[in-house]
Amino acid sequence: MLHRNTAQILLPSRAASERHLLELHEALVAVRRGDRPEAHCLVWPPGLDRSVLPRIRLTVRIRNVFKLFGLAEGDTALTVQDLLGLQNFGHSSLTDLILGLESFLRECIRNDASDAEQIGNDAEGSSRYRQVVSAPLATAPDLPWERASELLTPLLAAAVEIYGTKSLASVLHPDLVQLASRIGISSNLEAFQLRQLVEGTDGPASVASDRLASALEPKSIAERAILQHRVLHDPAKTLEEVGSMVGLTRERIRQIQIRLEHRIRGSLGNELKLLASVLKEEMGYWALEGEVDGRIAGLLSAESSLIRRVFRQALLRVMGYALRDGIYFDRRVSEVVEHLRLIARNLADDAGLVREEQLLAELPDEGWRPLWPWLQKRCGLHDIYGLLGIRNTAKARAKAALISIGHPATREEISRVCGLDESRLGAQLSLIPSVVRASKDRWGLKEWVDDEYDGIVGEILQRIEEDGGATTIERLLSELPSKFGVSPNSVRAYMQAPKFEIRDGWISVAKISSLQLRHLDGVIHGRDRDGDPYWSFVVDARFLDGYSLTGIPPEYAKALGCEPDAGMAVRVTNLVGCRDLSLSWRLASTTGASLGYLARPLQRLGLHPGQRARVTIKGLGLVTLTADIRNVDPPLPSGADAKLAQIMNRRRVL
């Protein structure tokens, strides 16, 4: 049986011994498995005074190493890494220490021989214990009250420090307080101020902060730099940066930081876990930055700035809190954010929009709603005219603006809401499958429109198909203007396009085989010295802004290799590095073929609006684009002159 030998050897209580065994658990499991414990594993628990070393069955080598390196005193934590870095202390010594300490603690528990309970260390590093009994426990006549005092005093001290509990009455169950009122002693209970009752007994925050202060003093210049710039600085400076400040290598800074962090963790002990558990239960998965910081500051109001910062960081880490945009949050909140992101992507429509109420329904419960603005921001969602967008694109703004209007609207009306230029707005709306044209000038959602407008050509084709391959001109001129607001003259113009054939008041789709083209020499502006045909045009400012050139003769498109109702890429052979031009020949067009992507080539040539450019055919899909010094189009030959010009051109080519 263990006995108290001298006043210098203070054995841990049963509760403390059980706690220390739990702290050794990871190292014990590894040793029993025959493995070496991980470097971070505790092999000497924080708060266990090393004055008990003589009572532990250890080899002479272990005792000598502890004395040699100044570890025979104090109660700071020691890890595997701390001890294996010492000379003459190897894996065998480590195993002996862990198993010997386990045997000692289990003997303390079995015999319940402790006569003092460890409650912390003061700033100078000396042990602070409170005497519980002065006589042997087995013969103490007042055992129940003394034992109750031993248990209740630290509990009440923790209540004062953590919850701010003021009086004995506030500790009691409401039913007991009501009973005390009936007995007539409630005022007496209020008079018992807990701070007076627990005077001399520190709460967990005070105990842990005192040990932390002891662990951080004295600090070397390197440790102060690491604390300031690696441990507490956000973002942390690199190992090289800190090393250059104090004249040490990167590896040496890393070693010092590991030992310093182990010392900090060991000094905070189970008190930190207790505080983290209580505060986390009080705060929940998330809390405002001011609330958390104020609560922690209240626990450590009397401590130095450095102690508060280190303690706060360690406490937040154990609580699992991260800080973003004024909110502390834990892993559960991160999981909710990821869930909302996934749901938003799955629910988003063809413009990347989702309704807010759909996402609010995915929150775990109503208590999360106050956090919604923050969650929305963390999910990367954008508030777009009453809807949420996974990206703030022009397409999303265009559709959201249309939905906010609530009925088919013109580009001008939509532009006033979303701020997009009207010329750009039409292109964006046409890219959204759920948005259709309700008429020539108005756009709306598909579900708003019974008969969507498909353009004059599309509407003509639709009615030709409805009527079995041909419809009347009269029907087109009466229905299309009245239903879609298009001009009768525009309808007539499109009916005259090569796409259609008109006969006896009826219109049908023309066969491509019936398409009649003029001879190329009848439409070009001339041929170059090599006999290659060219066609010239006046540069317009629109072409430099990305608009296509229209009015190209179909015969010219055919000569380049483009088929009717098709398109192709055309390479500019004399301008290396420019993207290919885009040639399109649509039979339903009233302006002939068109050539796109002219902006960059025209800029390379240095041409400005009003000047002329020449496109010369050099082969199938091949052209040269050059400046044309002429100010006007040469007159195209007609009649006998045309025939003569054609003959001369053919001879020149041959």
Image: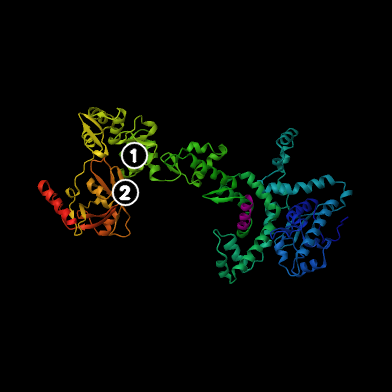
Q: Is residue 603 above or below residue 565?
A: below
**Quarter of the figure with the N terminus:** bottom right
> Which picture quadrant has residue 125?
bottom right
Res 85 quadrant in image:
bottom right
Q: Pick the residue in front: 331 or 274.
A: 331
Magenta range is 308-319
- 22 left or right of 308? right
Q: Residue furthest left?
A: 640
Reply yes or no: does residue 322 show up in magenta. Answer: no
310 in the magenta segment? yes
Looking at the image, residue 653 sits to the left or right of residue 390; the answer is left
Q: Main structural element of the magenta stretch: helix, strand or loop? A: helix
Q: Indicate whether 614 appears above or below 413.
A: below
125 is higher (above) or lower (below) than 431: below
Marks 1 and 2 close (CB-CB < 8 Å): no
Relative image position of residue 613 (x, y in whole percent): 21, 55
The answer to whether residue 552 is visible is: no
Q: Is residue 40 visible?
A: yes
Q: Residue visible at 86% across and 60% down?
A: 5
Of 143 and 599, which appears nearest the observer?
Answer: 599
Q: Amino acid at mark 2?
A: Met
Q: Quadrant of residue 78?
A: bottom right
What amino acid is found at the position of numbered circle 1 in the picture? Ile
Answer with left or right where residue 491 lies relative to residue 366. left
Kind of element beneath mark 2: strand
Marks 1/2: CA distance?
34 Å
Q: 520 or 623, which is in the foreground? A: 520
Residue at position x 83%, y 44% from top? 144
Q: Pick whichever of labels 1 and 2 is earlier in the sequence.
A: 1
* Dot label at residue 568: 2
Position in image of residue 433 (x %, y %): 39, 38
**Residue under circle 1?**
414
